[in-house]
Amino acid sequence: MTEPKPTMQHMLETIVGMMQEGKWADALVSWENFATCHSDFGATCLGIARELRDLGQSEEAESIFRKMLDRFPANPKPALDFAMMAYARREWPEAIRRFQIVRTRFPDVLDGHRFVGDLLLGQRQFDEADAVLREAMSRFPDEPRLAISYAWSAHRKGDKVGNWQEA
């Protein structure tokens, strides 16, 4: 005789209990089982990691985001969230490195370019920022935030804006 499939409510109650007890590893396995039965696992993992982040469980959240980078390489959301964790901690070199990953893996995602450019500006790496911003503006020509960042770079360097399409 086979056991009946657990109900959605029972599974969720069990998972919430594990989370309340701080049994994150067990909860994650249970979430995976839940997703197999009732949901999209990628969305479930993303939701768990974001919830952990919002609860102040940064190490656990980062661990899940890091695993998601390998498990879901075509999904930019975990990569962006992972990069934002370093940004929120004001770990600028690490944030730049992580947003560079977003930029490389997902060249059509604006925020990878925008954050790298702005972070490089903040680190006074103007030439590198300009190169990133010029490339991004060629990819997203109607995005005013990129043009504004490029103009700020010129201002901070004491340069003219010039024609970024010729650079």
Image: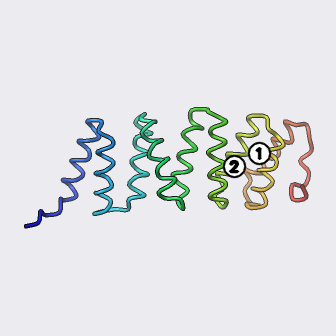
Residue 24 vs residue 150: left or right? left
Residue 43 vs residue 95: left or right? left
Residue ID for mark 2: 114
Residue 49 vs residue 37: left or right? right
Residue furthest bottom as drawn? 1
Q: Quadrant of residue 136?
A: bottom right
Classify the position of the C terminus by image quarter.
Answer: bottom right
Amino acid found under the numbered disc labelled 1? Ser
- Residue 64 drawn at (x, y percent): 44, 46
Dot 1: within a 10 Å radius of its alpha carbon, few (fewer than 14), some, or many (20 or more) residues?
some
Dot 2: within a 10 Å radius of its alpha carbon, few (fewer than 14), some, or many (20 or more) residues?
many
In the image, is residue 167 above or below residue 90? below
Q: Nearer the viewer, residue 146 or 60?
A: 60
Q: Helix or strand or loop: what does disc 1 sit on? A: helix
Amino acid found under the numbered disc labelled 2? Arg
- Residue 53 drawn at (x, y percent): 44, 39
- Residue 75 drawn at (x, y percent): 52, 59
- Residue 45 drawn at (x, y percent): 40, 52
Instruction: Say whether marks 2 and 1 touch (CB < 8 Å).
Output: yes
Residue 79 vs residue 57: left or right? right
**Disc 2/disc 1 C-alpha distance (Å):** 8 Å
Q: Helix or strand or loop: what does disc 2 sit on? A: helix
Label number found at residue 149: 1
Q: Quadrant of residue 16?
A: top left
The residue sitting at 48% across, 47% down in the picture is 65
